[in-house]
Image: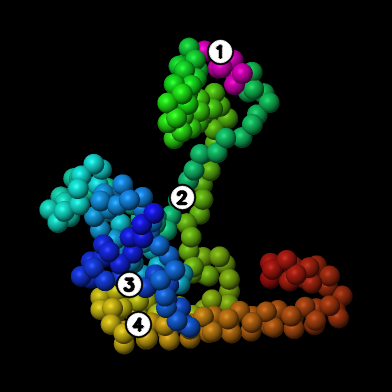
Amino acid sequence: MRIVNGRLCKQNGSGDFTFVSGSGSSVIDYLLSLPSHFSNIVQLQIDIRVESDHHPLLFHVVNNFPRSDNLLNSPDTIFEDTVTQNTVTSFDKYIWNEEKSEKFYTYWDSTQARAHIDNFESHITNTNVEEAAACLLKLLQSAATDMKHTCNCASRQNDAMNSGNTWYDSECKNFKRTLNTCVNRYRNNRSVCNLEKLKKCKHEYREFIAYKKQRHKNCNLQKLVFVANQTNSRYFWSLVKGKS
């Protein structure tokens, strides 16, 4: 295996930090490649995000072409893959249904199933493990077509307001804007000075958020103690469940 970090970066081949927090910065997230595939990776860039101390690794891959500067200017031949950058919003899930099981079992006797099985056996004989696994997966998916469900997944958002947390007020939002400003400055100019400002702002932002959360918990605890001494049990349990 080869480590790609530090070899294919925009900044004159020098590597960037992949982890930046309030307490320090380092390179702990790596893009690894087989030696035979290394020449297909033409560019690596370390992006910056506020939501996590770990930064996304963005890289360009070309298929069956040697690495060269000309390929960087040819978008038609470049496939971009983004690690931790894109958020999955939906995915297919297969849920077993006994009522539809008869069709599942019947499919295995079909001509299509036989073709998948023949391909599977052929790849196993030729020790093509990846192709054999793909054939087996296709066979199972085809047999369970009626059991497929599309599940929606909410986008990852670090803004606590999206989760309905009332403690995330205008002060938190303003602090977040300040942090975003530091991120953009470091993205445009990755100097030591801007890095130190970013680490300091991240540390202060997280301390402020922790303070807001704790103050909110203490306030709710005082409410619970007060209501517990009253006779309104319904209001007490609404506080416990976070509905008030």
Q: Which mark is residue 89?
A: 2
Q: Which residue is mark 3?
A: 16
Q: Which residue is mark 1?
A: 109
Residue 107 lies within the magenta run: yes
Identified by mark 2, the residue type is Thr
Does the image show residue 85? no
- Magenta span of residues: 103-110
Kindly report which numbered mark, 3 or 1, lies closer to the viewer in this rendering: 3
Q: Is residue 169 above or below residue 101?
A: below
Question: Helix, strand or loop at disc 1?
Answer: loop
Q: CA distance from mark 3 to mark 4?
A: 11 Å
Q: Earlier in the sequence, mark 3 or mark 4?
A: 3
Question: How many residues crowd mark 3 within 10 Å: few (<14), some (14–19), many (20+)?
Answer: some
Q: CA distance from mark 1 to mark 2?
A: 36 Å
Q: Which mark is residue 195?
A: 4
Q: Earlier in the sequence, mark 4 or mark 2?
A: 2
- In the displayed structure, does residue 103 sit left or right of residue 21? right
Residue at horizontal 29%, vertical 61%?
A: 44
